[in-house]
Image (cartoon, grey):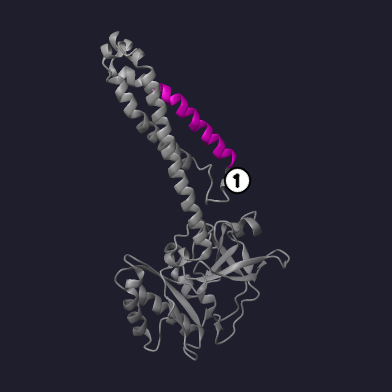
Amino acid sequence: VGIPVHDGAYPTWEARSAYFEQLRSKVAAVPGVSMAAISTNATPPSNGWNTGIEILGKAPKDDQKVRLNFVSPGYFPILRVPLAQGRIWDEMENHRAARVAVINETMARLYFPNGAVGQSLKIPEMKSEPPFLLSPPGDVPWLQIVGIVADKRNDGLRKPILPEAFIPYTLAERMWTQILVRSETSPLALLHAIGRQVNSVDTDQQIQGNVQDLEHWIQTEPEWQQEHLVAWLFGSFAVLALALAATGLYSVVSFSVEQRTNEFGIRMALGAQPGDVLRVVFRSAVVSVGGGLAMGVVLTLAFNNVLARWAEGSSRDILVLLSATALLSLVAALACAAPARRASSVDPMTALRYE
């Protein structure tokens, strides 16, 4: 929800900071809203302000660039950005514009290989420009890094993750902001109630016209539409391949049972139980299925770097490998069930006359 500030309104940092926080609190109180947070420029898919930084104790470099985001602490749980190390600043620190920062894992690896939490950075270009940008009283020199959050792929799966820093939005109060809302129902259904709460704070305040469901907004971005198409194609081919494999396995096992009908009849005549015949059929299928699964795991691990270009995460994830193996084993068992049941129910005398 976009919130532009009228010219001349809330001209001091204290007034503007209190106004934005009051808006956030009012929106958070709307029935059906589970969380609300301020995001001046950090709303995906296009987020952040690209700027240079200085690191305390290191010589300034022109190539030290980051994507800077101004947010409230509720931004991270609303967008489900997990904390990897350290902590997120709290509401009290946000209110008094504490000189703190949280960075992503990429920035930590790139600029702080020996540990980021406790280090300090400066944003030289972040200066007060009244009335468009208001800074808190006093200087905003060095910002202490208090936490590291997981990387986010806001630019698509095939683009590199950029170093990002997040700081309290109260360190740079602009003429506009955005309120992020997580709701228990359809977000757009709450728009009128949110508008009334905003007007209760300032009757002249209007919500910016471009209000969107964030999930839908991201899905309609060209970059993500292409990724969704690729994922859909891969998924469709995977389901088709699984169906063909199950059909092929069913045919092979059925043919094997047909060829061994006489053998099963002899086994039954000599006292074998139906369960014994079932085990014989499944044992022969396990050899081929097990070999295929083992080869699939080996190839998956070998081509991990190639697969990483098309999917988030790693194919070396043990949970993914176990889940895929379990699914394929289940499909193989279902494909073998009908032929195995036929083999175990064969009449010995009929089987002996089969040839």
Q: Main secondary structure of the magenta part?
A: helix
Residue 192: x and y in percent read 32, 78
* Residue for point 49% across, 61% down: 225
> Is 250 a magenta residue?
no
Q: Nearer the viewer, residue 55 or 104?
A: 104
Q: In the picture shown, does residue 90 fall above or below 298?
A: below
Regarding residue 350, the answer to whether it shows in the image is yes
Which amino acid, mark 1?
Asn
What residue span does the magenta drawing correspond to? Answer: 283-303
Residue 161: x and y in percent read 59, 59
Q: Residue beneath label 1, please?
A: 305
Residue 23: x and y in percent read 39, 79
Q: Nearer the viewer, residue 125 or 255?
A: 255
Which quadrant holds residue 246?
top left
Residue 256: x and y in percent read 40, 22
Characterize the local packing of mark 1: few (<14), some (14-19) or many (20 or more) Cα atoms within 10 angstroms.
few
Q: In the picture shown, does residue 162 fall above or below 305?
A: below
